[in-house]
Amino acid sequence: MLIRIVRMTFHEEAVSDFLENFEKNKVAIRNSAGCKHLELWRDENEKNVFITYSHWENEDYLNQYRDSDLFKSVWSFTKQLFSARPVAFSSKKIQEVES
């Protein structure tokens, strides 16, 4: 499984536009082939910073999504709202520590 994290910083006046667009598209994104999990997080101190946290079966499925019309539409809208470059990375869980 591949874990994808994308940190996005928005212009403060654009936050509601981002949230509205995410709400409109979240089910379609989550139902993309290979997407197993999707969360949206908000920074506790910087209210214009959001993070998407998603699980993908593998990198091929992530790339398939990134090549889709859905992604192109969502991303072209979203990137206009940024006040800083997004930071994205993919990881694989090595270990989970439980008490």
Image (cartoon, rainbow, N blue to C red):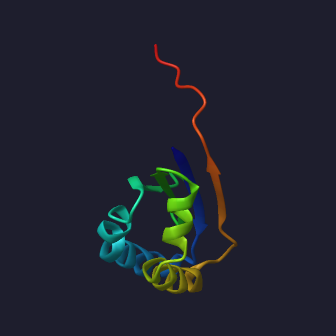
Q: Residue 15 or 51: which is nearer the viewer?
A: 51
Q: In the orientation shown, which residue stands out farthest toward the top?
A: 99
From the viewer's perspective, tell me whether residue 93 is left or right of residue 41: right
Question: Could you tell me residue 51's position as x and y percent?
Answer: 52, 58
Q: Residue at x 59, y 66 (%)?
A: 8
User: Relative to 78, is 29 above or below?
Assistant: above
> Is residue 46 in view?
no
Please identify the quarter of the rendering in which residue 16 is found. bottom left
User: Relative to 90, is 49 above or below?
Assistant: below
> Is residue 6 in view?
yes
Q: Residue at x 61, y 30 (%)?
A: 94
Q: Residue 11 or 5: which is nearer the viewer?
A: 5
Question: Could you tell me residue 62's position as x and y percent?
Answer: 53, 62
Question: Could you tell me residue 36's position as x and y percent?
Answer: 38, 51
Q: Residue 13 or 6: which is nearer the viewer?
A: 6
Question: Could you tell me residue 76's position as x and y percent?
Answer: 54, 86
User: Relative to 7, is 28 above or below?
Assistant: below
The mark total stands at: 0
Q: Residue at x 47, y 50 (%)?
A: 57
Q: Residue 26 or 41: which is nearer the viewer?
A: 26
User: Relative to 31, is 53 above or below?
Assistant: above
